[in-house]
Image (spheres, helix red, strand yellow):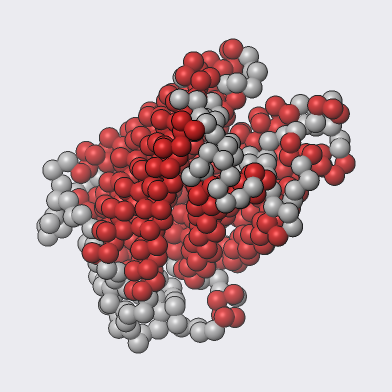
Amino acid sequence: MTEVITPAAPVHRGPADLHYLNEHRGLRSWLTTVDHKRIGVMYLWSVLLAFLLGGIFAMLVRLELLTPKKTIIEADAYNQAFTLHGAIMIFLFIIPAIPAALGNFVLPLLLGAKDVAFPRLNLASYYVYVIGALFALGSMLTGGVDTGWTFYTPYSTTSNTSVSMMTMAAFILGFSSIFTGVNFIATIHKLRAPGMSWHTMPLFVWGTYATAVIQVLATPVLGITLLLLLMERVWEIGIFDPRLGGDPVLFQHFFWFYSHPAVYIMILPGMAIISEVVPTFSKKTIFGYKAIAYSSVAIAFVSFLVWGHHMFTSGQSDLATAVFSFLTFLVAIPSAIKVFNWLATMYRGSLDLKAPMLYAIMFLLLFAIGGLTGIFLGTISVDVHLHDTYFVVAHFHYVMMGGTVIAFLAGLHYWWPKMFGRMYSESWARVAAALIFIGFNMTFIPQFIMGSRGMPRRYYNYLDQFQPLHGFSTFGSWVLGLGLLIVAGYLLGSLRKRCDAPGSPWGGMTLEWTTSSPPITHNFETTPVLTHGPYDYSLPGRRA
């Protein structure tokens, strides 16, 4: 039996006790805090606001596509709506949601640390995020952006919309991502509790570590690319514009060299959450700990090698296309390892179908569909037909929303009692989870069908034959939106109650469950003692 962490006994505190939420009251105390928990909460509310704004644009797009011709907005406004939906969701929500919001809160707790390695850098990362968000909002108020979230040249170098301000927003947000990544790497290396080895860390820490490596190595490529785009727009220096001797395909290479690893910045933390939720609600030791841990590192490594599968129709050589296709199949292997190990953990476990576990099961189903359809798109002959159709839109959303967002909801429900000391309504949570699952599939399964029949993505008008499928997809988005509104309602409603969450409401074995809910300012009364593993439910009294 390997030596791992044994937490100290849980500390139970009454609602009147001081903790990170009320030890220092007032707005100034929040704006100047270096407490990782408060910074995580500020990130959480910020990314949720971004999610709301991006969701409004998504609903606007789906409403416009209810009919083949104009429904409520003109073509130019439609182009801006889907661009802002994509840019806000990617840069302001999905990339920071799990690492910067949930990760900031729980990572030091999982490690048995008092805080992150660089608390002031942590606060700086949040302020940089806010500045980038303000630039993004500024672009909305000064003409919007209509290029798509990828900012493809040569249109992005000639568009008269606020491309410069939006690309500057993404550039600034990249620094926030790098700061967070550097901080987490240092924290994991230097602040683990005494006796915690690499093979006894919680799997959320492994996923966060792999994500941080991608953030630090890949994000500078995006920053340089966006700076070159700005220089092209301002000074016409001829890097991407073919009129000036540039190559627009070069922009795609630069952009996807960052943006495909960025896909794993989005999905790896989600996988890490599932690795925490599944053993806790199966009351069973995780199956294949090392395989799950190393698969996170493998995904991070291979993610840098597959960017060309976005460019099968962009004129690259046949050899390059074949190599990128092979590597696309290769990256599916470590992802499949995780899925099979989660299923093996659940097999013959004592499953407790609380809200976090429901979302974890949803993740397994939806991410499996997203991953399988990714294999289709990695097949060259199939991708040529499906490229730039609604099939790609559906695949992307099954990975990003069916994967990352659903995992985010699993983690939010899992750690909500720890973050705020309140228990939410389990009955409402189950209703919302059902609506989200049904609404999501109603929204995006028709898009697979449309794409396979040749419906291009991003089109304002479409043939009448696609109207029933578009209408069904739009109706599904309303069901999905209703489910998300219910989630917001019962979570926010729980904040009006007195603190009623125990230290370990789910019976988890990792260190965050050994302190009060919410935790005290410095997380633990004493340094945790190491005696058992993070998923050792084989101990007496630990298996339900």
- The one nearer the camera, 92 or 436, is 436
Q: Quadrant of the C terminus?
A: bottom left
Question: Residue 515 placed where, x, y %?
Answer: 32, 70
| Outermost residue, top side | 318
- Residue at horizontal 57 percent and vertical 51 percent from the top: 72
Residue 544, relative to residue 157: is it above or below?
below
Q: Residue at x 50, y 83 (%)?
A: 24
Which residue: 40% across, 48% down?
475
Using the rendered view, name the quadrant where residue 253 is placed. top right
The x and y percentages for residue 79 are: 64, 44
**Residue 53 percent across, percent down from the top left:** 54, 59
- The residue lying toward the viewer, choosing from 483 and 295, is 483
Tally of numbered tags: 0
In the image, residue 499 above or below residue 133: below
Residue 439 x %, y %: 35, 48
Judge from the rendering whether residue 54 lies leftward or rightward of residue 532; answer left or right: right
Whether residue 267 is visible, yes or no, is no
Residue 251 showing in the rendered view: yes
Residue 171, compared with residue 154, is above or below; it is: below
Q: Residue at x 29, y 61 (%)?
A: 429
